[in-house]
Amino acid sequence: MTQPFRFEVSATCGAARTGVISTPRGQIRTPAFMPVGTAGTVKAMMPESVRATGADILLGNTYHLMLRPGAERVARLGGLHRFMNWDRPILTDSGGFQVMSLSSLRKLTEEGVTFRSHFDGSKHKLTPERSMEIQRLLGSDIVMCFDECPALPATEDAVARSMRLSMRWAQRSRDAFGDRPGHALFGIMQGGVSPDLREESAQALQAIGFDGYAIGGLAVGEGQEAMFGVLDYAPGFLPQDKPRYLMGVGKPDDIVGAVERGVDMMDCVLPSRSGRTGQGWTRRGSVNLRNARHAEDPRPLDESCTCPACRNYSRAYLHHVVRTGEIIGSMLLTWHNLHYFQDLMQGLRDAIAAGTLPQFVAAFHAQRAEGDIEPL
Ligand SMILES: [Zn+2]
């Protein structure tokens, strides 16, 4: 018998929770940060290296994979886990956000969205039913409902119309997903910055019933203060016994603030993307390795970090390979950044379990306020 998808909270501290999501492909410790493997790879990383940083789960993008190489091809090759050599849980998004942010000539109807690929201009259609089919073909462990993401800024009327469309699509997603033991379907709460719309959306989703709930429509340029404003109340509209996922977040201080407010899962391209642009994230904030001050600095990027970039290489070397465009520069900084993000999650989980989250958060902000190490 297939092991069911299960979430257990083991400790809380204020609104924050820590626990474990159990899936047939392994456990996910929460709060969890999911590295983004957009096109079947976390860029510049081997899957075993991603695992070594402490990641329990990856995110894959439906939009990218449906266009290249195509969901049917991935299915013929044994599914996404086998295709990309990652045997642990994978969450796939629904494609809705990328259709909005990347494609062109979009046409939105009650049925779904037609659009042209940003790769080659080819025409495609995504509906709740097709999104569920693609995510099933990929073999995703956690499937996301197909939703509509309104472009910002939007009036409250426009946000309300879009949210209600997403709720009708949530029902169609649920119907199309069917009964798949061991696989989970998450609903996505919308409603912008309106508490009334957020509550209406949360109630509509719970009437349908999902294995977890995402808080959508945030981290789309509204700013941290507005995002935290919504997170002060929105998680409270969702059931206590189901995971809450904040999509597309974020910077380390966004993550800490979201966890304090009761978020269990997050994903962001930030650690991997900034690893390819010479930026390192540490306890002291972000460090631009392109900067000439690192050119003769023999110290590691972060003396307390145990990742290969910090154990074996100097800031001077990282500066050199970033400036010369060597591939190892992207590899080392991506590894370090993912390691730092996973270390941060472990610190948050431990602090929630110990009941010391306020002290952990105070120390987190104090270290960042000190800034990067003194120049030599
Ligand atoms: Zn490191």
Image (cartoon, helix red, strand yellow):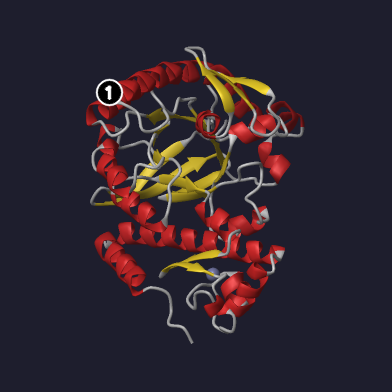
Q: Position of residue 110 (x, y in %)?
A: 47, 12
Q: Residue at x 28, y 43 (%)?
A: 226
Q: Nearer the viewer, residue 174 or 270?
A: 270
Name the side, left or right, on which 33 lies relative to 192.
Answer: right
Residue drawn at point x = 66 percent, y = 41 percent: 81
Q: Residue at image x 51%, y 28%?
A: 96
Q: Is residue 189 above or below residue 259?
A: above
Q: Nearer the viewer, residue 239 or 235?
A: 235
- Tell me if residue 314 can be seen: no
Residue 14 in picture, x, y percent from top left: 23, 51
Q: Is mark 1 within 8 Å of ligand 1?
A: no
Q: Farthest residue toward the bottom?
A: 376
Q: Crowding at label 1, few (<14), some or many (≥20) Cα neighbours within 10 Å?
A: some
Instruction: Return the x and y of residue 125 as percentages of the image width and height.
Output: 61, 19
Residue corresponding to mark 1: 200
The answer to which quarter of the image holds residue 84 is top right
Location of residue 375 with respect to 243 vertically, above or below: below
Image side of residue 256 versus residue 5, left or right: left
Ligand 1 lies in which image quarter? bottom right
Dividing the image into 4 quarters, which one contains the N terminus?
Answer: top right
Decide: is 106 above or below 279. Answer: above
Q: Give, as a three-letter code, the residue at label 1.
A: Glu
Percent of width and height locating residue 174:
47, 20
Depth check, front residue: 156 or 342? 156
Q: Secondary structure at mark 1?
A: helix
Q: Is residue 214 visible?
A: yes
